[in-house]
Amino acid sequence: MSDSHKSIEVIGADISQCEIVIAWARSQRPCQRIANKREAIVVWLKQLPAGCVIGMEATGRLHQQLADLAAGHGHVVYVLNPKHVASYARGVGQRGKTDPMDAGVIARYVDRERDGLHRYVVPSALQRTLRDLISNARASCVILRRCARASGLRARGPTAP
């Protein structure tokens, strides 16, 4: 970790539908919980010093609001692959799985590994539209597949002539 990284606040956020659990790397501050609502997120972001680094796992659509708002407030945001975070947690010996522990591991992961991570970029309106179309199409395919399985149908690959 470079000296310039040491003075920057690094935050890990564990996001659920109802709340966001926040932990700080290199700090003895207790975890904080805020509602996963735009108003609560904006109030919290305004309390942070400029240029914080905020990491979170990609959680379907739940992470998008925090990521977009934090980036819009000038913070550096990393949206992480949950499998990478889980592997890191096992590697550092985390045994339990609670929201505060997850937020702490995310903060630690971003603090130690951010030089190799890709910074989040707020998507354009067209990118959002495409992402939503793809996501909706995928969700429809998943539902159709479940229905087919429930009715006893099986998908078959191409047959040879």
Image (cartoon, grey):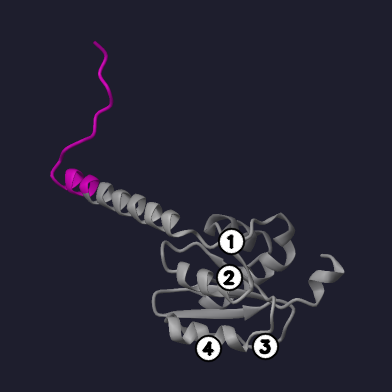
Residue type indicated by callout 4: Val
The picture quadrant where one finds residue 74 is: bottom right
Q: Residue at x 58, y 61 (%)?
A: 120
**Which mark is nearer the camera, 2 or 3?**
2
**Which mark is nearer the camera, 3 or 4?**
4
Quickly name the residue at label 2: 71
The reply to whether discs 2 and 1 touch (Cβ–Cβ < 8 Å) is: yes
* Badge 3 or badge 4: first in the primary sequence: 3
Quickly name the residue at label 3: 29
* Badge 3 or badge 1: first in the primary sequence: 3
Quickly name the residue at label 1: 120
Q: Give the range drawn in magenta.
A: 144-161
Q: Position of residue 9 (x, y in %)?
A: 71, 78
Q: Is residue 79 visible?
A: yes
Q: Residue at x 54, y 55 (%)?
A: 83
Q: In this view, does 148 lie above or below 64?
A: above
- Relative to the observer, which residue lies in front, 34 or 38? 38
Q: Can residue 102 be seen in this view?
A: no
> What whole-number distance in Å separates the C-alpha atoms at marks 2 and 1?
8 Å
